Amino acid sequence: MTNKTDIQPKARRIAQTNIHFDEGSGKIHAANFQPSLFIPAGSEIEVLEFNPKQLVFIVSSSGKKFYYFNHKQAAGNFTAHIQKVFANTWDSNKIGSLSSIDQEGISKGKPLLGMSKDGVFLAMGYPPSLENPDLQAFSFTYWVSRFNRLKVIFNSSDLVIEIKN
């Protein structure tokens, strides 16, 4: 079993959120662009290559290969980012313990009104840290593409009350 700082070839890790990817290229960016396709949270991956610029991996269940690129707009340490997104363990009760609206949003890979902040993290991943330095904030801005933004606004109970595209 690998330790928390070990992201070496053949290491197996588990997606802690849905991981959105570009269908044509299989590319994933640390800035967390939001195309409609995603690798489901809880999916096991096998690391093929890891360096400061990219993580190359396959999804164990499908054998599909992906390229997860560091992105200057993501800000922060790429290794720490990868360790947050792909951990050594997964709580199989995590999604089932959330509300039905959270579960629906997670299965669709998008935010829905009434979702919890934890549900949004699982559905969409973490928002780009350069634009969202405080995960306790009442709104997150996700990047749908280079030029399109999606703002998710929460109330004081951390439930989604508005989604602006």
Image (cartoon, rainbow, N blue to C red):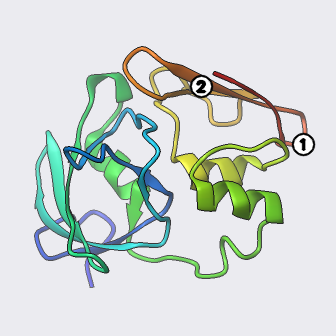
Number of disc labels: 2
| Vertical order, 15 against 12 (above or below) | above
- Amino acid at dot 2: Leu
Q: Which residue is under mark 1?
A: 157
Q: Is 61 placed left or right of 160 in the picture?
A: left
- Which of the numbered marks, if any, corresponds to residue 56? none
Where residue 117 sits: x, y (%)?
72, 46
- Residue drawn at point x = 42 percent, y = 55 percent: 38
The C terminus lies in which quarter of the figure? top right
- Residue drawn at point x = 90 percent, y = 42 percent: 157
Q: Is 31 placed left or right of 10 in the picture?
A: right
Residue 75 in view in this figure: no
Circle 1 packing at 10 Å, graded few (<14), some (14-19), many (20+), is: few
Q: Which residue is under mark 2?
A: 150
Residue found at the far right of this picture: 156
- Residue drawn at point x = 80 percent, y = 58 percent: 101
The N terminus lies in which quarter of the figure? bottom left
